[in-house]
Image: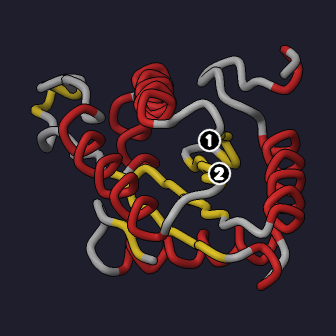
Amino acid sequence: MTETEIDSLTQVLLPNPGRELLRHMHHAAQVSDSTLAILYIDIDNFKRFNGHNGHLLGDEVLKELATLLKSQLDPKQIVFRIAGDEFVVILPEITTEDAKYLAQTICDIARRKLTPPQPTHCGDKPCQGPIKLTVSIGIATMRPDERSHLQLLQEAEDKMYEAKEAGRGRYVI
């Protein structure tokens, strides 16, 4: 990876190199007839958190999540930042059960670690209390011949929105 392919804030791949790597890993999985899974991760309540606490604290949350994700992955698994507070994890050669276990682990750790200390006073008024940050994760798994890498990515994103609708702080497959 070159410096131009890495997000300077989170130190993970940027969207275009990430999508290209997904395309490449999808093709490699097709050739080797192996499985591939994607986790599509979004920080719950992040926009509201940024509005109340400012972008500097929000940037710290993004860095913390990127660090958390990288700490849970093995070397052949890849994470990239696809949008503001959304990340994608590419999981080659993984079972559905292992993808679900990883997603639950990420949800659990994020629930404990993502919410930083927040100010108790907003100007001259008390704040409404800390905004709890969790993650919602959509999982898409497949054998590579079933659909394209872009269809897999879209399915994972759709599942992430289902996780949000189901109450946030969880995964949906």
- The quarter of the picture where the C terminus appears is bottom left
Residue linked to disc 1: 77
Q: Residue furthest top?
A: 3
For label 1, the SS is: loop
Q: Position of residue 54 (x, y in %)?
A: 43, 28
Q: Residue furthest bottom?
A: 146
| Quadrant hosting residue 111 | top left
Residue linked to disc 2: 90
Q: Amino acid at mark 1?
A: Gln
Q: Position of residue 42 (x, y in %)?
A: 49, 54
In this picture, is 57 found above or below 89?
above
Foreground residue, 66 or 146? Answer: 146
Q: Residue at x 25, y 34 (%)?
A: 115
In this picture, is 120 found above or below 159?
above
| Quadrant hosting residue 101 | bottom left
* Label pair 2/1, CB-CB below 8 angstroms: yes
Neighbourhood count class around disc 1 (C-alpha, 10 Å): few under 14, some 14–19, many 20 upward = some
Q: Amino acid at mark 2?
A: Ile
Q: Residue at x 39, y 68 (%)?
A: 97
Q: Residue at x 43, y 37 (%)?
A: 50
Q: Residue at x 82, y 80 (%)?
A: 145
Foreground residue, 20 or 53? Answer: 20
In this picture, is 1 found above or below 45?
above
Q: Position of residue 170 (x, y in %)?
A: 31, 65
Q: Viewed as shown, does residue 52 lie left or right of 30?
A: left
Separation of marks 2 and 1 at Cα, in angstroms = 6 Å
